[in-house]
Amino acid sequence: MTENKNGVSGSSPNIEAVLKRRRASTIEVVDAKSAVDLATAQSYSENVFLFVPNLIGYTRVILAALAMHYMNYHPKYSTVAYCISQLLDAVDGHAARYLGQASKFGAVLDMVTDRATTSCLLCYLSSAYPQHALIFQFLIALDFSSHYMHMYSSLVTGSKSHKLVTSDVSRILWFYYNDPTTLFLICAGNELFFVSLYLAHWVSTPISLSISAFIPLLEGLTWPEFIALICFPVSALKNIINIVQLWKASKILVGVDLAERAKAREEANTL
């Protein structure tokens, strides 16, 4: 093993492993025009746009749009549409695996729908609670940047899915993504926290005195505030995971940069 003047091993096994992992990715369509032509010419029996999981994804988008439409004046309709849209997120993955219809388009559609719907709700919460607008804006920025960088780092390292995280990269992310129950509970708890904050803006009736008599801490709270209080630790955990995800993705991208630069210097030295 040799080390160049910049302190990076040109023939390091780590560098070779990174570059080999990238070369071992799935079928690569170099020309974007070729990919467009393939998508245009696809048959009805193999139309990725019409895969059942993707149809579920379109339904989620429509329900999310309805939730946004009703959000400013009909909280019940908005909450029902939003919650169904989010619950369907747990269905499309199972459908994809059961029907053998997993697709890159579906994975990206799923992630974009998640990010967009949550961000729209957080935008509303920024206006409903202007004194906390900066916090909601930070959560939007963290959510987008964390997932974008994680998705991109997965692509450049040749991973078939952003959910395929090994424990040697991050034990936290491995446990989060590889245990379906954990993934569902954390995501559901996070969304329920935001939905509860939304409903708390509309509901002003305190919890029944007969209930608060047994639990003094509930006195004066509305039921959405009570649910938000329960779900807050889960939401906090979800955003801690987002921070970990952002940091790990940043390190992966920097590692790939270093590997490619070292490989380029090694090739230049052999000329």
Image (cartoon, grey):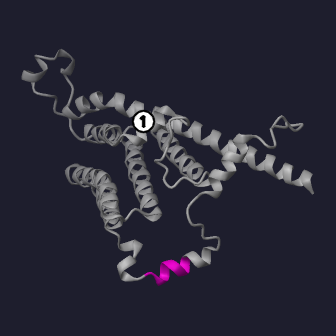
Using residue 162 as the reference point, say whether residue 153 is left or right of it.
right
Give the camera-side residue of 211 and 125: 211
Tell me what residue is drawn at x 49 percent, y 38 percent: 242
Residue projecting furthest to the front? 1
Question: How packed is label 1: few (under 14 Cα within 10 Å), some, or many (20 or more)?
Answer: some
Q: Which quarter shows the C terminus?
A: bottom right
Tell me the kind of residue under disc 1: Phe
Q: Position of residue 187 (x, y in %)?
A: 35, 41
Q: Principal SS element in the magenta part? A: helix
Rendering coords of residue 264 (x, y %): 82, 52
> Residue 148 in the image: x percent, y percent?
54, 50
130 lies left or right of 83: right
| Residue 37 included in the magenta stretch of the image | yes
Rendering quarter of residue 255 = top right
Q: Position of residue 136 (x, y in %)?
A: 45, 39
- Numbered label tally: 1
Q: Residue at x 34, y 65 (%)?
A: 58
- Which residues lie in the magenta part? 36-42
Residue 57 visible, this orientation = yes
Depth order, front residue of 207/174: 174
Q: Quadrant of the N terminus?
A: top right
Q: Residue at x 87, y 38 (%)?
A: 4
Q: Above or below — where is 119 with respect to 40?
A: above
**From the viewer's perspective, is 88 left or right of 170?**
left
Pick the front one: 3 or 186: 3
Magenta-colored stretch includes residue 254: no
Q: Identify residue for label 1.
A: 175
Mark 1 lies on a secondary structure that is helix
Q: Is residue 143 left or right of residue 157?
A: left
